[in-house]
Image (cartoon, grey):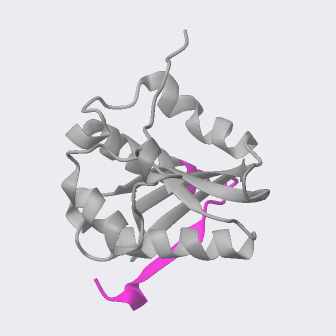
Amino acid sequence: MAAASLEIRPVNWLQADESRAVVAVLDSYASHLVGGGVPLSAKVKENLSTELSKRTNALVLLAWSEGQAVGLAIAFEGFSTFACRPLINIHDLAVLPKFQCRGVGKALMAALEAEAVKRGCCKLTLEVLEHNQHARKLYETVGFASYQLDPAAGRALFLEKKLA
């Protein structure tokens, strides 16, 4: 895919086609093994755009090629207490299967980094499944690595506790 044919821009929630595109690309990702292998529920499909649009700390970017949404990045601004500066956590990065390995993911990552620099962020963070080699290769290519404060303390782990 030629770089000229790819446009990355923030979602305009007032445009129904853009809201639908967010849901469609995220649903494609969720349906794939690395996204959990389960399509989004009807409730999520119905409410996702409205709920995301309410989040003032959300950064949602769509990648467009020839009028079609082909990729998506959903990130949230957080805060690093150790740096006393904002950070951007990349929550979802998804590219439609037909458009993978064509520079879309790299373009979305570059756009997220540019926005983080513009906001004065100290870092970008994300999580990735250990066996998702395709995504890990992309993240390493654009400069991501696991982190540790001190090698003696070990590497950081991502943990979760689901709530009802």
Start-end of magenta stretch? 1-19
Quarter assignment of residue 86: bottom right
- Residue 17 in view of the camera: no
Quarter assignment of residue 114: bottom right
Expressed as whole percent of the image width and height from the top left, the position of residue 79 reads: 73, 50
Q: For this view, does 157 lie left or right of residue 95? A: right
Q: Is residue 10 magenta?
A: yes
Q: For this view, does 129 lie left or right of residue 66? A: left
| 162 in relation to 7, above or below | above
- Residue 139 in view of the camera: yes
Q: Say which residue appears at 50% left-offset and 63% top-offset.
A: 62
Expressed as whole percent of the image width and height from the top left, the position of residue 149 reads: 53, 52
Q: Residue furthest top?
A: 164
Image quadrant occupied by the C terminus: top right
Q: For this view, does 85 lie left or right of residue 148? A: right
Q: Is residue 99 magenta?
A: no
Question: Total marks drawn?
Answer: 0
Expressed as whole percent of the image width and height from the top left, the position of residue 115 reads: 65, 71
Query: Foreground: 138 or 103?
Result: 138
Q: Say which residue appears at 67% left-offset and 75% top-offset.
A: 117
